[in-house]
Image (cartoon, rainbow, N blue to C red):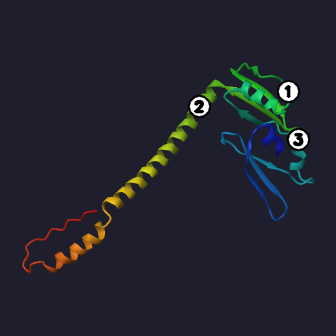
Amino acid sequence: MRFYVDQLGFSVAYDVRFGSGERWVAVAPPDGTALIALVTPKADSEDYQLIGRCKQAVFITEDVTAVFHDWSKRGVCFHHPPQATDWGGTFTSFDDIDGNFFALVGFDGVNRQIEAQRRATAEKLEFERRTAQELEIAKEVQARLFPQTLPYLRTLNTRVSAFRPARSAAITTISLV
């Protein structure tokens, strides 16, 4: 956990200890767009044999060189400096303290799509937050402007009912809410 928090700059999203003594920790990068579960498998399990053999994890970033320099300053030992690739991206790699391999990759097409999706999600959340806030303000304003509307209408309705003429051809009821 220290490697991910201290060296990669991730934050602890969850840290749970179960009654059995097992612990489940999840860490997230600074933007919170992903979670990585850190689990210590039992020594006699098949999963324990996989420690240091992970070769499929990839971190995608907009600026591989900046992350490379930042993480290098924090003590992450990379296999090589960022390199341009044939597929139009930038790539480097490193191992965590257990020997699990990680790639750090950036390529314009994916980065643009990820950024567009992130912006769209942020805009949607901001729109929903503002809408909810405006609705609350409208309710407060309405309550202040018309504090006795309902009791007054109930009283008015009772008074009108008491004075209705017996031979009324038509009675129109208007609700004000």
Q: Which residue is mark 3?
A: 98
Assign a secondary structure to mark 1: loop
Above/below status of 84 relative to 104: above
Location of residue 22 (image quadrant): bottom right
Question: Going from the N terminus, do you reach mark 2 or mark 3 first?
Answer: 3
> Residue 90 is drawn in which quadrant?
top right
Q: Amino acid at mark 2?
A: Gln
Number of residues whose C-alpha sits closer than 10 Å to that of mark 1, classed few (under 14), some (14–19) or many (20 or more): few
Q: Is residue 138 left or right of residue 125?
A: left
Instruction: Quickly name the residue at label 2.
Output: 113
Tell me the tag on residue 79. Answer: 1
Which comes before the other along the chain, label 1 or label 3? 1
Q: Residue at x 30, y 62 (%)?
A: 146
158 vs 23: above or below: below
Q: Residue at x 35, y 61 (%)?
A: 143
Viewer-proximal residue, 122 or 139? 139
Distance from disc 2 to disc 3, alpha carbons, whole Å, reads 32 Å
Q: Position of residue 114 (x, y in %)?
A: 61, 33
Q: Residue 138: x and y, percent? A: 38, 54
Task: Kindly give the residue lying farthest to the front in the view shown.
Answer: 144
48 on left or right of 85:
right
Which quadrant holds the C terminus? Answer: bottom left
Give SS at disc 2.
helix
Q: CA distance from mark 1 to mark 2?
A: 28 Å
State the mark number for residue 45. none
| x 88%, y 38%: residue | 99
x, y percentage for residue 83? Answer: 77, 20
Q: Are marks 1 and 2 in contact (CB under 8 Å)?
A: no
Tag 1: amino acid: His
